[in-house]
Amino acid sequence: LDRPVPHDWLLPKCRACISHGGAGTVSACMKAGKPTGTVPFGMQSDQPFWADVLRSHKVGPAWFDAKSYSVKKFKTMIADLITNEEYAKNAKAWGDVYKREDGVKEVANEIEKL
């Protein structure tokens, strides 16, 4: 690619997502309703936290950090993401919630109450 590609254009076309696990990318994957795997690069960042959230909500498999990366682990993650129907069902449910909510409006309403 020679330029950035918007998440809201790309991710709905995907069967699943794998990312570093940052909050913005995780949010985009969940908004798209896609099973999501994570390979955190920053173990002192929010990435492992979001990887744990995804796993606990059963929208993706157990994560591994980038330092322990192997082709075998990556292939296993991909296979799990595209074959596990529970991940797909749960990720779609998260996507449906995102589509129903207007987060900006809700935050604005709360600020107005102050």
Image: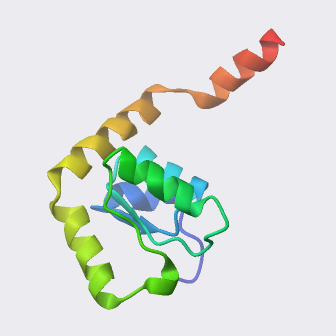
Structure colour scheme = rainbow
Indicate the position of residue 85 as horizontal and vertical percent values. Answer: 16, 51
Camera sees residue 8? no
Q: Does residue 76 sit above or below 37 in this rendering?
A: below
- Side of 21 where 78 appears, left or right: left
Indicate the position of residue 42 as horizontal and vertical percent values. Answer: 62, 72
Q: Does residue 105 sit above or below 92 in this rendering?
A: above
Q: Does residue 109 sit above or below 9 in this rendering?
A: above
- Side of 112 where 69 appears, left or right: left
Camera sees residue 74? yes
Q: Residue at x 53, y 68 (%)?
A: 5
Foreground: 27 or 44?
44
- Side of 52 where 71 appears, left or right: left
Name the quarter where the C terminus is drawn: top right
Q: Residue at x 28, y 42 (%)?
A: 90
**Farthest top residue in view:** 113
Indicate the position of residue 84 as horizontal and vertical percent values. Answer: 17, 57
Foreground: 69 or 106?
69
